[in-house]
């Protein structure tokens, strides 16, 4: 009986590497599945009523102060899916809203043209991993329920935000979120 130890060791090594890769990916997938994100859209407040707004600082490199309504117009509860759009010049976060969110987005973008949507995002349970991400000006009515913005965040932070938002959307859709 001929036994080739060298080829047996190669097969054993390949099997161990495959098991390690599968186990490593599984634990990474588990931790990513538990990761939740939040995204809140606030509308700029003209500040006409005392106490009706809050002033926040948006954009870290060149801060802009914007007074916003204290209640969000849209939240992660209205998001069906999120995606990170990469291009040669940068990246953007795109969110697709559910039926109620689409209706609200259309109403707010119709009523508040020329004002800012101020967007707050949090991509982990740590408070330090959340901040005001963007303040795009509403230039037109948005009817399709899809909104894209360039966040004041690194690519890694934006990727974590998108993963967290998609996990949150799955939880809400399955009824596991109270």
Image (spheres, grey):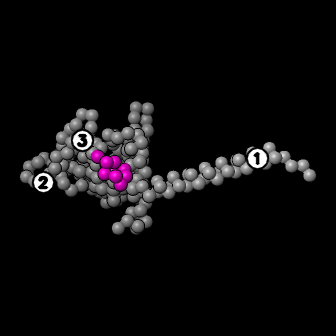
123 inside magenta stretch:
yes
32 inside magenta stretch:
no
Q: Position of residue 121 (x, y in %)?
A: 32, 49
Q: Does the image show residue 145?
A: no
Q: Which residue corresponds to mark 3? A: 58
Magenta region: 122-131
Q: Quadrant of residue 100?
A: bottom left
Mark 1 and mark 3 in contact? Answer it, CB < 8 Å. no
Which residue is located at x 92 percent, y 52 percent? 1
**20 left or right, relative to 3:** left
User: In the displayed image of the protein, which residue is found farthest to the top?
Assistant: 89
Q: Which mark is residue 9?
A: 1
In three-dimensional space, the C-alpha distance between marks 1 and 3, rounded to whole angstroms, equals 58 Å
Q: Position of residue 106 (x, y in %)?
A: 27, 52
Badge 1 or badge 3: first in the primary sequence:
1
Which residue is located at x 61 percent, y 50 percent? 21
Q: Residues within 10 Å of mark 2 (few under 14, many from 20)?
A: some
Q: Which residue corresponds to mark 2? A: 52
Badge 2 or badge 3: first in the primary sequence:
2
In the image, residue 119 sits, relative to residue 154, either above or below, namely below
């Amino acid at each position: 009986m001929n036994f080739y130890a060298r080829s047996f060791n190669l097969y054993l090594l390949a099997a161990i590497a495959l098991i390690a890769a599968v186990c490593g990916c599984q634990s990474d997938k588990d931790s990513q599945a538990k990761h939740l994100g939040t995204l809140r859209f606030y509308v700029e407040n003209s500040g006409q009523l005392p106490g009706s707004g809050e002033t926040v600082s948006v954009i870290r490199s060149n801060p802009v102060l914007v007074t916003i309504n204290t209640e969000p117009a849209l939240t992660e509860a209205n998001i069906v899916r999120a995606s990170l759009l990469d291009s040669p010049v940068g990246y953007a976060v795109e969110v697709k809203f559910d039926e109620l969110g689409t209706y609200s987005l259309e109403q707010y973008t119709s009523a508040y043209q020329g004002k800012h949507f101020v967007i707050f995002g949090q991509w982990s349970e740590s408070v330090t991993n959340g901040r005001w991400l963007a303040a795009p000006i509403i230039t037109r009515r948005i009817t399709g329920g899809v909104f894209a913005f360039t966040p004041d965040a690194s690519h890694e932070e934006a990727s974590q935000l998108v993963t967290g938002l998609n996990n949150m959307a799955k939880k809400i859709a399955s009824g596991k979120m109270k």
